[in-house]
Amino acid sequence: MAELKIFYRDKDKQDKIKVGRSVNILSSLDKKDIIWIDLLDVSDKTEGVLEDFLKIDIQDDEEMEEIEMSSRYIQTDDSIVANSNFLRDNFETEPVNFILKNSILVTTRDVELASFNETVKKMLMNTRNFPTGYHVLVSLMETRVEKDADMIEDTTDLITKLSGEINATDQVDEEVLIQIKDLQEKVTIIRQNIMDKQRVISNFLKCDFFPTELQPRLTMIIKDINSLFEYTRFDFDRLDYLQDTFLGLVNIEQNKIIKIFTVVNVVFLPPTLIASMYGMNFEFMPELAWKMGYPFAIGLMVVFTVAILLIFKLKKWL
């Protein structure tokens, strides 16, 4: 659902932030009072009005999804344009465009994101901590990294649960391997996502006109991201171990099957050999005329079969 939010300071009470939901309000606002304009799947017409009002160029979906780093961060003398992917609960990524100019933050996205809703709550509860768009941007990044940490924690819990299931049974289930692959994919997506944040925030730290008071917070976000990298590496190691364990169980199961076939082949080898001997079409075979020849051959087969089974039992191969 399309939605426009314009966060601005009240002229009478500067410590109070109001929210406008139409571009018509822009004509009555001083640009210095505008803090943040959030565009959620708005029309091209609305974007055009904002571009004329703020003298900016809002990127389209294709530009927002550009992979090249040179296109994901652009800095001019008085503005910053950055693109970053935000993860949704279903592990799909949503590109978000950030434009900072004259301390006004403009964000463009196509879907609802929990990080934005959390930041709005923080902003309206403690307005003094959000004097400019720079502060909103940093808060958005902090909230997003916190969400990434929660997703990593949830994924780690799933890995721990899966590990317990594998250790609790000797049965081989293909579903386990599918779960391992799914978790590996999720950890990879999270890692790529936080790497994207790291690059964007590193560029903010290099920006000459980014408020110095926010530098420590940006540095702390980088430290948090580095910690998350360690967690993802730990999860990858655990998943590799689980995969090796699962494949080991598969090999054991296959060896058991091969062992059964081997035992069957060895047990029936002597009877097969005896039957083959007496099945030869030679003219003179003394046992063929012997009255006890048939019982003798059967008995010989049974004796050899029992003997082999006893040997296997003594060797503990059965």
Image (spheres, rainbow, N blue to C red):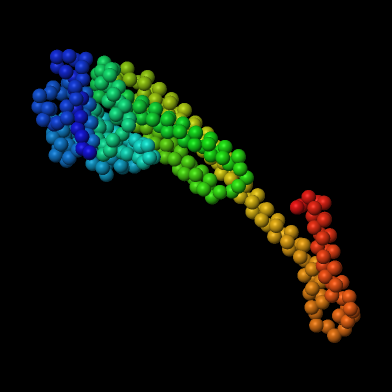
Q: Quadrant of residue 117?
A: top left
Q: Quadrant of the N terminus?
A: top left
Q: Residue at x 36, y 26 (%)?
A: 142
In the image: residue 278, left or right of residue 166: right
In the image: residue 39, left or right of residue 180: left
Position of residue 272 measured from the top left corner of the image (x, y, whole percent): 77, 70
Q: Residue at x 89, y 78 (%)?
A: 291
Q: Is residue 206 above or below residue 262?
A: above
Position of residue 6 measured from the top left corner of the image (x, y, whole percent): 19, 27
Q: Is residue 208 in view?
A: no
Q: Is residue 170 in view?
A: yes
In the image: residue 243, left or right of residue 25: right
Q: Is residue 313 above or below residue 304?
A: above
Position of residue 113 measured from the top left corner of the image (x, y, whole percent): 31, 34
Position of residue 309 measured from the top left corner of the image (x, y, whole percent): 80, 58
Q: Residue at x 22, y 26 (%)?
A: 36
- The foreground one among 194 and 317 is 317
Q: Residue at x 87, y 76 (%)?
A: 293
How many numbered circles are shown? Answer: 0
Q: Quadrant of residue 75?
A: top left
